[in-house]
Amino acid sequence: MKERTREQMKEIFEARRNAFAKEMENAKIGAVIFEDTEGRRDPSVRYFSGHINDAILIIASNGKSILIPWDENLAQQNAFVDKVIPFTRYERQTVRSVKAVLGTMKLNFPKIELPPCTPYPLFLSYIDSLRDYDVLCKENGLHSKAVAMRAVKDEYEIECTKEAARIGDIIIDLIEEKIKKGEIKTETDVALLIEKECRKYDCEKTGFDTLAAGPERSFAIHCFPNYTAGEWPGKGLSILDFGVVYNGYTSDTTLTVAKGKLSREQEELLALVQKAADSALGYYKKDLPVKTAAAKADEIFAKAKKSMPHSLGHGIGLEVHEYPGIRQRAAADVVFKPGMIVTLEPGLYDPKLGGVRLENDVLITEDGNEVITHSRIIRI
């Protein structure tokens, strides 16, 4: 993907904060606090500032931003904000740091919104300390607006996710090649190969702990442990679920390996999952309710007297599971929008037959969609 200058990156983050500030103006909220700390991780800090992790970000309704990072050196290198004030200046005390920084900002409104995940004792500490402000902490406030903003990717986010997808495809091709050569023998082999290869292509990490399940464990939606020294792929149905992160943005793919002669019932699982993936893709389109695509996949399985025990997909981005969830019980007004990147991952699982899941990442466009990963059912 094309490199951008620091000035260009600064413009990207300013544009996001300015769009968010308009929402704040409409809601008459003076400042919103975002917190990315252990136990309360919020990727919106990175989304609005570029900072990697461990920081408090305060955005005012005039668009001004102040970052309070644990690691000042990382912040100076990665953050694109108006001001950086190290957390150590306030002895790493959250409420004290927020109070001090708010006192330096000229706010248009006295209302302050905290993250909805703020523990109640901490909320009370804010109330006691910020007596000059109207302190809010609610589920459907401006933090939910930030989540909705993150669901529709800008040009830079799409480029980053496509690069993660491209690298993931390279790894999938390599895995298929090594399977056929007999060079991958265990779940651990394939999991460690992914770790090694993604770093070779400048990825930050895997998107989540790789899930590699041989035939005896593939019946689980998410196998536990994530991978073992067990045979992979063994005779029957094996599953591999992984993602790689490039510039913060993750891919998310699942492939199924069908090895040897399968039973009629196992072949049926493969055919049904492939049919569901192919059919539901046509409903991943601008302005269509996400529940329509999920209903199509569920209908295919229901006709075969099968059911899928998870949603058809979800958004991806700075987190592997983001808004929207693609399921039948989604609200009718939750629709696909151009710029969304979502997974399409039908799956069926049976304790005796094993499991099948096929997952790819789909970019919603103005005139349809673009499948940006190329996971598949591999037969050997």
Image: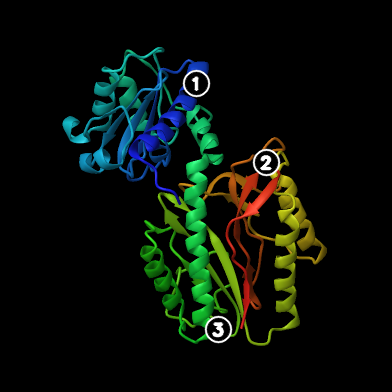
Quadrant where the C terminus lies? bottom right
N-terminal of the pair, mark 3 or mark 1, is 1
- The residue indicated by pointer 1 is 22
Lateral position of residue 109 relative to residue 215, left or right: left
Pointer 1: residues within 10 angstroms few (<14), some, or many (20+)?
A: some
N-terminal of the pair, mark 2 or mark 1, is 1
Q: Residue 234 carries which label?
A: 3
> What amino acid type is highlighted by mark number 2?
Glu
Secondary structure, mark 3, is loop
Vertical comparison of 256 with 250: above or below:
below
Foreground mark, 2 or 3, reads: 2
Vertical comparison of 81 with 349: above or below:
above
Residue drawn at x 43%, y 62% as measured from the top left: 209
Q: Is residue 92 visible?
A: no
Q: Position of residue 130 (x, y in %)?
A: 31, 18
Residue at mark 3 to residue at mark 1: CA–CA distance: 55 Å
Residue drawn at x 39%, y 36% as measured from the top left: 8
Vertical comparison of 340 with 178: above or below:
above
Secondary structure, mark 2, is loop
Foreground mark, 3 or 1, reads: 1
Which of the 4 image quarters holds residue 215? bottom right
> What amino acid type is highlighted by mark number 1?
Lys
Q: Where is residue 375 in the image (x, y as percent from the top left)?
A: 59, 66
- The residue indicated by pointer 2 is 366
Lateral position of residue 204 relative to residue 353, left or right: left
Lateral position of residue 294 relative to residue 380, left or right: right
